[in-house]
Image: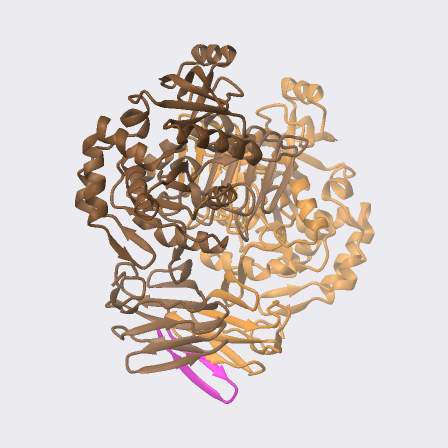
Chain colours: A brown, B orange
């Protein structure tokens, strides 16, 4: 059976300030209402015979993965938490082991979580072709027929035809210079290396055993010592970290003599920059893409994204990318957006946080947004999901006032447990053991005013936590 | 004696989004720490023999004028509230009547509140020259020696020399086209019409009597029926509104045979647009002016202003103006900033508020800032100045929670009056008569959470108000 494997890696700095380390590109709704991760699992779920998707992600993103799956009603085939980044070959190895434990005959469809595919029918046809080749023992990579001479991707040169629309891989080539890329496009036998693969899980492990046995050994040890944590599988840290870091391309695909490529034109994009998002977006007659509250005067060929409760006005500009978020705004020339990296590097070296977190922070129980800060106080807007609870906790350096603005909150404060209704408030003194819980069916929204000498997120002692964080 | 008259008119849309109808350009600190209005009164106060300045302003701006004077320690010579905009001739007429009531020999130095003068010594020398001419009965206008062929100003052609650096005015000319402006600059006998004047108050009224008697009659009637209100003089609405609307240039200066001009080079600018602010600002080696938290990569010849708690990043851009405020961001090509008017027009016709008010609103008792809004609640950060009090009031449709985060607030809630200290909170039920007062010497800062079905500013019944607003 076909087991989709979604690789949710990547730090996502290239779409800063919308993407942050704690919410990278794959979890953003960049095109339409769903995130790229959601689009990817939905696309996979429609394939004939597809099993629930296996997601490989970083520990920090586990609750987001869980919630985003739930939001689109897709059952999880497993959420494997990578304790360290070791590139794609080890990530696919643990997914293969996970799948084989359930289905000795598993076929894997490996897809990065952050790619866009516009033509799903063409994609499905390519998957069907690849499935046939995989049954014959081929390790199939999907090659995107190039629209133009892109220098940012690797290319695959195809060799002999294998039938079913597939070809033997003649050669993988690194990112070319412009002239070489133009030649590749003209020749018609080269395709972009999309990072999507299809093969038997056991075939992949067999090839790993041959070409990269240290990766396979580490993956086996890491999965043997893995621990279940709620809906997540915690892969063993030390065992996994011992794996060499290598991509599937280098570790397996370039070495095996059974690499095949299925070329496809499916409106694929990796949305690797703001300019590539602009190029795949629906645009108006002047070449503009606006999101949110934008008032534009004589503006052309630009991407403008306003954020909630804020407007952007543009006058007489062209070829710009303007992206607003609650704490940072980017204004960049469209052909210079790759230098977002330089801005993120400056933020890093200044010890700042705008590349790590959004002002609004998602937690397993809901979210909070720091809407106002002063010298000795902070105001947060907190939303607690139905049925959810924050940890039982206390703070050494701050007291908290809570005012419920919608829903009914159950409050624990030392020995007392009581309900707080809309428009009621309470006070949590410094040092008091407290908990906030939503036993209702609607979200609880409240305003928290913190006061004290130190208001950092690290002043928290978790005594009990239903999400395993204490 | 010399009575500075500060004309604080102008709707200030040209510097949107920083300027708003309720806080136009003259009240903004655009260059340095003081507002243009404060710079103007400070400059006037240093002139030999200068009396406290007389300010003519709109009713909406009276508390801002009072506070900005107080903040720089300048005593007021009167704050005259114009009940309607009638251009400069009537505004100067009421100021002349006000000055003559105190000093029968008053000389007026008329200055718009929103101009920048960099070379104060040159300005003082010009005032001295003009004072001599005024003693001889001349009505003096200050002509700015042009640096370049500006087409946005009127020009003054000088005639015969009058001694003391002054000249008879040969002719006032309207805003010229580019070629004409270039000729004016080349000829050296033309100067920009700065809108600054110096003359005897009685002389001005005499000329009005001759050339525009309806304006004088209206001004006399309006001042005769004026009412004192705290530190303000409320000019009579109906009488003032009956005045023709006309500028001093048309009504008097172009008609009198006693118009003189004193040419001066004093680093004058009317900061009529974001590009003119850029041109007078200190810039870095790449031609950029940054204010606030800005991270720039390869940016040139741009003006970038970040707002509090938010950062702006720029990449590869040039000749841009980027101005951020809590609720709106402008990105404009520097040579297109005059089209800010088009954005403001769009806001007006859409019935929006971003051209009228800032998110943070100044009141006579302090300020409030709406930091968070939801479906049935609003969170405000409120600051009450030492000694100040909000009106005794009630709301029909909202309850309020108050949490003091610094200082001590005196709270009235129906029959009770009590102190609320730092980190204490209280609740004002819907319909309760309440008041907030600061009896201390430090500002009181509090968080207000409003809840209810309607949260507009107009749901307020003022029962008592020390600022005359009930």
Which residue is more in the foreground, A90 or B333? A90
Q: Which residues are magenta?
A: B406-426
**Figure check: B4 above or below A44:** below
A32 relative to A62 in the view: left or right: right
B312 relative to A286 in the view: left or right: left
Do we see residue B443 in this rendering? no
In magenta stretch: residue B410: yes
Do we see residue B275 in this rendering? yes
Q: Main secondary structure of the magenta part?
A: strand
Q: Position of residue B410 (x, y in %)?
A: 43, 79
**Residue at 34 percent of width and 77 percent of height:** A412
Q: Position of residue A354 (x, y in %)?
A: 37, 45
Name the image quarter holding residue A219. Answer: top left
Name the image quarter holding residue A14. Answer: top left
Name the image quarter holding residue A153. Answer: top left
A334 relative to B309 in the view: left or right: right
**Residue at 73 percent of width and 57 percent of height:** B84
In magenta stretch: residue A257: no
Which residue is more in the foreground, A360 or B167? A360
**Residue at 50 percent of width and 33 percent of height:** A128
């Amino acid at each position: 059976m076909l087991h989709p494997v979604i690789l949710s890696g990547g730090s996502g700095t290239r779409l800063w300030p919308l993407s942050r380390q704690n919410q990278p590109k794959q979890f953003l709704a960049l095109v339409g209402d769903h995130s790229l991760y959601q689009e990817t699992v939905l696309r996979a779920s429609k394939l004939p015979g597809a099993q629930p998707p296996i997601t490989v992600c970083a520990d920090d993103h586990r609750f987001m993965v869980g919630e985003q799956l739930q939001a689109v009603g897709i059952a999880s085939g497993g959420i494997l938490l990578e304790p360290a980044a070791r590139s794609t070959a080890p990530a696919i190895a643990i997914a293969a082991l996970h799948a084989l434990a359930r289905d000795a005959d598993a076929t894997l469809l490996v897809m990065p979580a952050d790619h866009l595919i516009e033509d799903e029918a063409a994609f499905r046809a390519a998957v069907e072709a690849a499935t046939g080749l995989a049954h014959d023992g081929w390790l199939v990579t999907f090659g995107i027929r190039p629209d133009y001479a892109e220098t940012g991707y690797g290319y695959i040169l195809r060799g002999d035809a294998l039938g079913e629309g597939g070809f033997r891989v003649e050669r993988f080539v690194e990112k070319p210079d412009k002239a070489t890329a133009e030649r590749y496009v003209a020749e018609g036998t080269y395709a972009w290396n999309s990072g999507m693969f299809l093969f038997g899980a056991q075939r992949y492990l067999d090839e790993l055993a041959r070409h990269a046995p240290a990766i396979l050994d580490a993956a086996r040890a890491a999965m043997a010592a893995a621990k279940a944590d709620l809906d997540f599988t915690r892969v063993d840290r030390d065992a996994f970290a011992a794996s060499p870091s290598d991509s599937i391309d280098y570790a397996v695909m370039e070495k095996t003599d059974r690499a095949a490529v299925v070329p496809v034109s499916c409106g694929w994009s990796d949305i690797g920059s703001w300019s590539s998002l602009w190029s795949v977006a629906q645009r108006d007659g002047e070449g503009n893409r606006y999101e949110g509250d934008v008032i534009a005067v004589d503006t052309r060929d630009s991407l403008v994204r306003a954020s909630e409760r804020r407007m952007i006005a543009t006058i007489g500009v062209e070829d710009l990318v303007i992206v607003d978020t609650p704490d940072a705004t980017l204004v960049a020339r469209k052909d210079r957006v790759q230098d977002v990296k330089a801005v993120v590097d400056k933020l890093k070296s200044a010890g700042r946080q705008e590349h790590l977190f959004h002002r609004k922070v998602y937690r397993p129980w809901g979210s909070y947004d720091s809407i106002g800060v002063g010298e000795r106080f902070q105001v947060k807007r907190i939303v607690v999901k139905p049925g959810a609870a924050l940890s039982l906790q206390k703070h050494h350096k701050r007291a908290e006032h809570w005012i419920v603005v919608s829903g009914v909150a159950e409050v624990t404060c030392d020995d007392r447990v009581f309900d707080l209704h809309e428009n009621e408030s309470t006070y949590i003194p410094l040092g008091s053991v407290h908990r906030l819980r939503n036993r209702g069916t609607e979200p609880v929204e409240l305003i928290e005013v913190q006061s004290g000498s130190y208001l950092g997120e690290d002043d928290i002692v978790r005594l009990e936590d239903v999400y395993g964080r204490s």
